[in-house]
Image: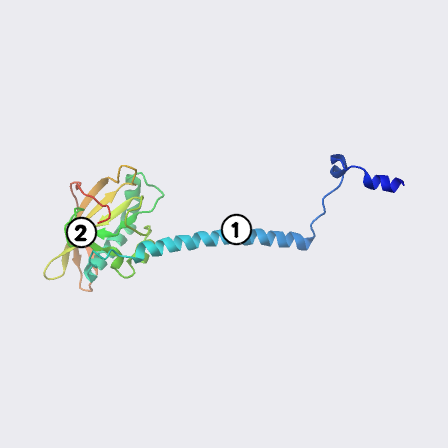
């Protein structure tokens, strides 16, 4: 009778408070730890895949209305990117308040310091250039993102093919009002006997009045 009454009486919080939760066995703790690691790993992998997809998408589709760079222009772009990596990339970023960020390379180029002087071309049509600029500490090739950006114009190459000049401009991180040009240079290059381009002279130039939106 007493047992029946005990079984039928209400259960109070005080009854539950006195009971200890079951302890996990060593196997249970190991399974829980493995599950937590797996979940974290899944999120990390998804983030990496998303970034790789965004990079592939940004660098794989050149604008069909624009020309492809010549082999010499692709070589010159690589030489200039490498020169900034070796010489002043951190200083340029610091000069536009972008310490700790990565410089973008603008995908579009014209025969000017930024005005749309045709024929325009798209750096994304340089084989391997996107991967190369990332090994040099740059962000991916960009066609209109918000980070600090370097613009390299199309090259004016002399008749002998051993000297060229290009415009470079530096843009601060973009805000809602646009992305102002902060510095501009005229860069002269020479081509050595082995075919490698190297910088011969860099001259500060007036800031251009330009528009770098998509063509």
Q: Earlier in the sequence, mark 1 or mark 2?
A: 1
Q: Quick one: label 2, few (<14), some, or many (20+) residues within 10 Å?
A: many
- Which residue is located at x 63 percent, y 54 percent? 31
The relative height of residue 6 versus residue 202 in the rendered view (above or below) is above
Identify the coloring. Answer: rainbow
Question: Residue 135, can we see it?
Answer: no
Q: Is residue 86 left or right of residue 73?
A: right
State the residue in front, 165 or 51.
51
Residue 29 shown left or right of residue 105 in the figure: right
Q: Position of residue 139 (x, y in %)?
A: 33, 50
Residue 79 falls in image quadrant: bottom left
Q: Crowding at label 1, few (<14), some or many (≥20) Cα neighbours within 10 Å?
A: few
Q: Which of these two is toward me, 35 or 83?
A: 35
List x then y, in percent, for residue 136: 32, 53
- 154 lies above or below 206: below
Q: Is residue 137 rendered to the left or right of residue 192?
A: right
Disc assigned to residue 110: 2
Which disc is residue 120 wearing? none
Residue closest to the far right: 1
**Separation of disc 1 and disc 2 at Cα?**
45 Å
Residue 123 can be seen in this image? yes
Mark 1 sits on what residue? 40
Q: Nearer the viewer, residue 135 or 14?
A: 14
Q: Secondary structure at mark 1?
A: helix
Say if 162 sits above or below 109 in the image: below
Numbered disc 2: secondary structure:
loop
Q: In the rendered structure, are the residues bearing label 1 and label 2 in contact, judged by CB atoms less than 8 Å apart?
A: no
Hey, which quadrant is residue 203 in on the image?
top left
- The residue drawn where x is 27% and y is 41% is 172
């Amino acid at each position: 009778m007493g047992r029946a009454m005990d079984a039928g009486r209400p259960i109070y919080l005080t009854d539950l408070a006195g009971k200890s939760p079951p302890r996990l066995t060593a196997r249970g703790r190991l399974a829980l730890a493995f599950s937590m690691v797996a979940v974290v790993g899944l999120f990390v992998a998804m983030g990496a895949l998303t970034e790789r997809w965004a990079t592939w998408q940004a660098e794989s589709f050149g604008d069909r209305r624009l020309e492809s760079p010549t082999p010499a222009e692709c070589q010159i772009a690589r030489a200039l990117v490498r020169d900034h990596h070796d010489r002043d990339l951190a200083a340029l970023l610091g000069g536009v308040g972008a310490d700790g960020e990565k410089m973008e390379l603008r995908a579009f180029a014209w025969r000017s310091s930024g005005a749309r002087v045709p024929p325009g071309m798209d750096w994304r049509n340089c084989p391997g250039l996107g991967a190369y600029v990332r090994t040099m500490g740059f962000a991916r090739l960009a066609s209109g993102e918000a980070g600090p950006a370097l613009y390299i114009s199309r090259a004016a190459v002399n008749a002998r093919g051993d000297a060229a000049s290009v415009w470079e401009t530096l843009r601060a991180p973009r805000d809602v009002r646009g992305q102002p040009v902060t510095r501009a240079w005229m860069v002269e290059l020479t081509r050595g006997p082995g075919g490698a381009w190297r910088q011969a002279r860099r001259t500060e130039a007036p800031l251009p009045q330009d528009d770098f939106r998509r063509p």
